[in-house]
Structures are given as structure tokens and as C-alpha cells.
Image: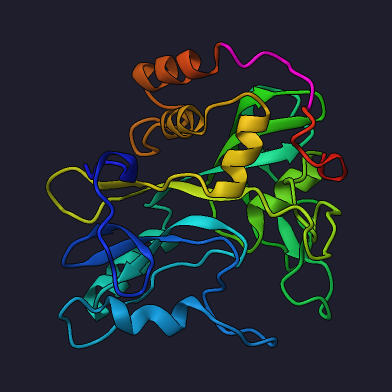
Amino acid sequence: MTPSPEAVPNPSEPTGLRILHRDGMMLVIDKPFGLPVHAGPKGGETLSDQLDGLRFGLPKRPELAHRLDKDTSGCLVLGRHAKALALLGKLFAEGGVDKTYVAVTRGAPAGDSGRIDQPLAKRSPHRGWWMQAVPKGTPGAQEAVTDYRVLHRGEGIAVLALSPLTGRTHQLRAHLAHIGAPILGDAIYGGASRLPGGPKLHLHSRRIVVPLARKGPPVAVSAPLPPHMCETLRALGLSPDEIGQAADAAFGSKAADAAFGSKAADAAFAKTTADAARTPVPAGVPPESV
């Protein structure tokens, strides 16, 4: 397995992007908050503009194997050539890649762990990719399934580990809003302010596990939490490193255990969250955000 970036030096790359993993087939980068992967109607810098600087000796630049929203940070996989992209695309399409996210939410699910099994559909043909949860059987809806674990509960705020079993647009954001726990800083699904200086989206692609090799262990990579989420966690009296480690341990391999991982993972999860008692929201967290 690949060690998490906290355990290895960060190589200096020409693009300024943090490279979490590199091999002959793929790169895993730590996508910064606020960087879109493709150009939008407003223009501006994109990840696509920087891909030529990530060739590392190959004749063609790497390309995206999947996507993250502009304001979602963390692990993003790039295929380094056509064969790699085809394999990665198949793995992502068939649910063979394990993904774990960390989110800070306004409110919390009723249970400490569970599954959100709710189809998603476009809100309107005029609203782009904005999604909404809809009843099963709704024409045009797509199946969407998310597992969650609560890492911390406070008054009006929670920290969750999330594992999307499907890969729908805005799935995590729409699902959490649907159960009454929208992500902190979500201007689309959570009512956060869109004005400059408003709260940032607190959603991070923490860990990704890619079974590339036919023989041998999968590639497992973790991305450190971004500064704005670390600031919020510290204001709640939590350690960002411990929250990241708890998220890493929250879900086992889907192939080995479709529920909630091994006994070892459960033990690590319980150890990290044992002291996460219900605490009030401190002054360091913007009141309009929670």
C-alpha cells in the first residue's frame, strides 16, 4: 500500500500541485479547494491547464479518470496513458474503486452509521447539473447510494466519513441535504452565502483505494485535510489528523466486507471517536454557517 502523504515527503512539482502517488499507470493528486477541473462559462484557471506539467517523461499528458467538484478538495486520479485510462474508467464505472470523503455538516444523521439509498434526478432542465433526491421509480432518476459514519457530533454540527457506492453528480451534497444534514458552506444544497468571504464547502476526498495490479495489494492513498476544514475542526476541539485517521478506518474494503469493514477498522474507528462527546459550537465557527 502507498503511505499517506502525512508519512512521506511531498515532492516539489512544476505545477505546484501536491502529488500523492505516481506510478507507470496513474497519478493521484491533491486537488486544491476552488480549482475547477475543466473550464466553465466564467473562465479562469483550471486543472486541465496544468496537466502538461504532469507528464514526467511520457509523450502525452495525463487525463482525468474521474472528477471532483470545483470546491471539493482531495484525492483525484489521473490516467497516464490510454490503456491506463481505459482500465481506470472500467474500475470507476463498475464500483471497483473505494472512495472515502470527510464532510462537516449542519446537523447530523439520526444514526451513528447507515446508508442513504435515494435516487437523484436533475432539479430542472434549466439548472445545469443541480440535483435533487426523488422517490424510487421516478422517470429519469439515477440510483444513488451513500454509506456514512458519524465521527463527531456537536450542537448543530457534525463530522462525517462518507463512502459513495455510486458516482452521481453532487451525490454526497444532495444526499446529505436530503436527510437534513447539508454540508457546511454548500451554497447550492445548504443555503450558504455565495458572497465573498462566505463559508467554504467542507467536503474533502480523503482516501482512495485503486486495485490496479492483478496480483498484489491495491494502491491506497490519503490526502491531508485542507486548511479551512482543519481550522473548523480545531475550533471544535478536534484534531484534523485524528479525524483523517478515523475516516481512513471507517469503511473496510467493499470486496471483503460490504458492511463496515473489519474488526480492526472498527476498533480504530472507535478509539478515535471515543472522546467525541456532544459539544457546543465554538465562537471560531461562523454562526451563519451552522
Q: Locate residue 227, reporting x and y percent.
A: 55, 48
Quick one: quadrant of the N terminus? top left
> What main secondary structure does the magenta stretch of the protein show?
loop
Q: Is residue 277 magenta?
A: yes
Answer whether residue 128 is visible to the viewer in this image.
Answer: yes
Q: Locate residue 58, reporting x and y percent.
A: 17, 82
Quadrant assignment, res 193: bottom right
Q: Is residue 106 magenta?
A: no
Who's the residue at 47% across and 35% down the image?
244
Q: Locate residue 64, reporting x and y percent.
A: 40, 73
Q: Is residue 114 above or below residue 184?
A: above
Quadrant assignment, res 69: bottom right
Quadrant assignment, res 159: top right
Q: Is residue 225 above or below residue 157?
A: below
Q: Locate residue 48, reporting x and y percent.
A: 45, 81
Residue placed most toward the observer, 119 or 66: 66
Residue placed most toward the observer, 117 or 221: 221
The magenta-colored residue range is 275-281
Who's the residue at 74% across and 35% down the image?
284
